[in-house]
Image: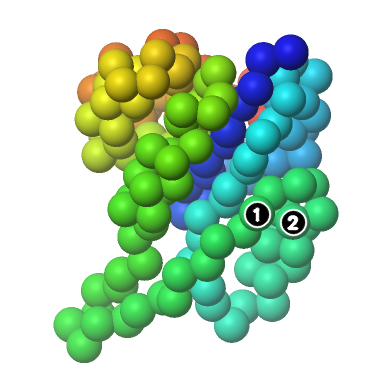
Amino acid sequence: MQTVAIFVDVQNIYYTTKQAYQRAFNYRHFWQHISQQAEIITANAYAIDSSDDGQHKFQKALKHIGFTVKLKPFIQRSDGSAKGDWDVGITIDMLEISPTVDKVILLSGDGDFDLLLTKIKQKYQVKTQVYGVPALTAQSLINAADEFVAIHSGSDFLL
């Protein structure tokens, strides 16, 4: 059976599915879908730590499904902007696991990951798959992936 590692940019998936479809991503269905096709070696969900009870319930649900939830503090800047970017953390984790799996699955539309996917494909000959909302996923990321799975309004991956 093929081995996979899953990396979820939680904020990106939350905001893109909400913006495009006013719906949430169905992580349980996604997990069931992937686990029928491959052995999940690792599955990390990268999120922002907040004091919101809804976020804590959501993170607990992700853990129950099988994800390792990695949290970074939410930083509110004095100018009103916020910071809580996981790009470097996702990159480090993906580079570390790529030599040990057959496929890497990224849930994100962030074009910053296109170079990462290109690098791990070249260096480790690992297959790459990206899940994202088509209209809100960078074309460079779609092009860098071996396979792009569109999250669309009729998708089983939406609640």
- The residue singled out by tag 2 in the image is 63
Residue 136 is left or right of residue 79, and the answer is right
Q: Under tag 1, what secondary structure?
A: strand
> Does residue 61 appear in this view?
yes
Tag 1 near tag 2, CB within 8 Å: yes
Mark on residue 68? 1
Mark on residue 18? none
Residue 111 vs residue 153, the one in the foreground: 111
- Bin the neighbour count of mark 2 within 10 Å (Cα to Cα): few under 14, some 14-19, many 20 and up: some
Q: Give me the residue at 57% from left, 36% from top.
A: 6
Name the spot of residue 82 as percent of width and height, x first.
30, 72
Residue 124 vs residue 94, the one in the foreground: 124
Residue type pointed to by label 1: Thr
Q: Quadrant of the C terminus?
A: top right
Name the spot of residue 68 as percent of width and height, x first.
65, 54
Residue type pointed to by label 2: Lys
Q: Give me the residue at 34% from left, 25% from top.
A: 120
- Taking the view exactly as shown, the residue that stands out farthest to the left is 79
Cα distance, mark 1 to mark 2? Answer: 6 Å
Residue 113 against residue 45 in the figure, above or below: above
Q: Quadrant of the N terminus?
A: top right
Name the spot of residue 86 as percent of width and height, x first.
38, 56
> Does residue 19 appear in this view?
no
- Return the disc, 1 or 2, that comes first in the chain's sequence: 2
Residue 82 against residue 152 in the figure, above or below: below
Residue 101 vs residue 131, the one in the foreground: 101
